[in-house]
Amino acid sequence: MAISPAWLVFCFLFLGHGVVELEASHQVYRDLKLSSSPPEHQPYRTSFHFQPPKNWINDPNGPMIYRGLYHLLYQYNTKGATWGNIVWAHSTSTDLVNWTPHEPAIYPSQTSDINGCWSGSTTILPWGTPVILYTGIDPQNRQVQNMAMPKNLSDPYLREWVKSPKNPLMAPTAANQINVSSFRDPTTAWLGPDGSWRLIVGSKRYSRGLAILYRSKDFFHWVKSQHPLHSAEGTGMWECPDFFPVLINSKLGVDTSTMGPDVKYVLKLSLDDTKHDYYTVGTYNIDKDIYIPDKGQVDGDSGLRYDYGKFYASKTFFDSAKNRRILWGWINESSSVNDDIKKGWAGIQAIPRALWLDISQKQLVQWPIREIEKLRGNEVRLPKQVLKGGFSFEVSGVTASQADVEVSFGISELAKAEVLDPSWKNPQALCSKKGALVDGSLGPFGVLALASKGMQEYTAVFFRIFKGHDKYVVLMCSDQSRSSLNNNNDKTTYGAFLNVDPVREKLSLRCLIDHSIVESFGGEGKVCISARVYPTLAIDDKAHLHVFNNGTQNVQITALSAWSMKKARIY
């Protein structure tokens, strides 16, 4: 491969001080006693979502594409199905669907990370070199920021990484007054027009969430700004921040350093207090180095979320091969810790999603990557039909425990919609109050996933339509209250208001069903809800799929297609 002068300078800075090899720490961790093998029968193990063969996983870290290969690094417990003993595990893929594992990329091996290698990001430097910045836990249990880079750039699998001996590059001090236990998860860096790199690190001061801004001329020496990129009172610790540009009026993605009049900016934050990922859309004032959310955007848990169900610690990257921005997110279990230990694993990654700015410029849209459609098998397609109030039917001919379902509804009797009480401002609470069994006028109507033969168990994903003050309001719910006869599971109901006008637009719903997860996309990706469920009856070939309408008014099914999904190759 061609060697750029900039790369030679970078190597001189990096290597001139020596490097810290990771091979020794690999040897130490290879000898660790791992947890026993998971049980042979695994009814809740997914077939096309990313998860390793066993043990605990959480945050996706440093996703990237390098020399035609996609890389996913993630937090992984080498010893068991609960959090602890965390390393950066590493897998590669040619299509974001089928994955090959490699040796973990980063282990505790330096003073600056001896007590843990926590989350971080990858930055692709202008000459193509990937560099990881990550949080380490030092002997005093301070959270500090470290660097690692590939040992061999000619290896597309990036199987070996070396750490900078100058680590940590950023650390709490008495002078900067950074909270030593709340300073983590550096973002992908962006290059400003002044030639300086910038990144943010999540933090807090009392209850105020902070995106601490750092600048660097050479990517090694980082200087803390006098002010954060952004902050918000009452939001608590900001974990796993993500800051990136999105194009106006285009579904294409752009590199993180892209600037100009054709882009807006997204700041995503993972709220440690609530374990929700929220985001705002706004502008970036490069002269003042501050981010300003647009008018109407809400900082905090009541603002916009990537996903209104189980979804946390997300991370995006720019896919330069297909000019798109891809979102990864961790989906934790809803089962008990004892059940996790029994099954030998915990945590999966959501299906990667393409992400872009909605035409309204007020929110993002997300959609499963097209590559996942390669796993679609036989299709069941139903003709247009009226679904009468109080009726349901089974969608047969599809593997209901492992399926991709798309359905669209048309509404003709909108005038009969139930009036929206002005006090109903919390959509999740409203979905809990008006679950799938509570009849209304227009709704609930939608899909019953992972349903047992006698309907003792099912997960209901549905819409309700209300008549608001000056418009119709669409509520989307994922009701897990009857998902399992095992009451040790968290069966929280999730919900969100969907910004779709049922007068002019169709109401669409897509559900990716994979044994113990139902990932749902409403309004062509304007609202996403992921649910973890663990039926005791509706497992494997005993699972069924239904479309239902428990409202009093008829609705029209304008299109319905369902596919059995093949198993991805994930080793």
Image: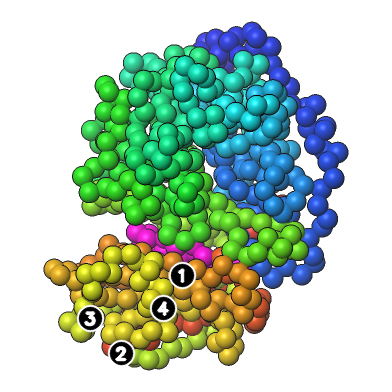
Q: Is residue 546 above or below residue 307?
A: below
Q: Amino acid at mark 3?
A: Ala
Image label count: 4
Q: Nearer the viewer, residue 186 or 365?
A: 186
Q: CA distance from mark 2 to mark 1?
A: 23 Å
| Tag 3 residue | 417
Give whichever of discs 2 and 1 has the lower sequence position: 1
The answer to the question of whether label 2 and label 1 lie on touching residues, with beta carbons closer than 8 A, is no
Q: Residues within 10 Å of mark 3 (few under 14, many from 20)?
A: some
| Tag 2 residue | 552
Marks 3, 4: nearer the viewer = 4
Q: Nearer the viewer, residue 409 or 443?
A: 443
Image coordinates for residue 216, horizontal then vertical, percent: 45, 17
Can residue 140 be seen here? The reply is: yes
Q: CA distance from mark 3 to mark 1?
A: 23 Å
Q: Residue lying furthest left in this view?
A: 470
Q: Is residue 392 above or below residue 489?
A: below
| Tag 4 residue | 435
Give the number of the disc on residue 493: 1
Q: Amino acid at mark 4?
A: Gly
Image coordinates for residue 328, horizontal then vertical, percent: 51, 48
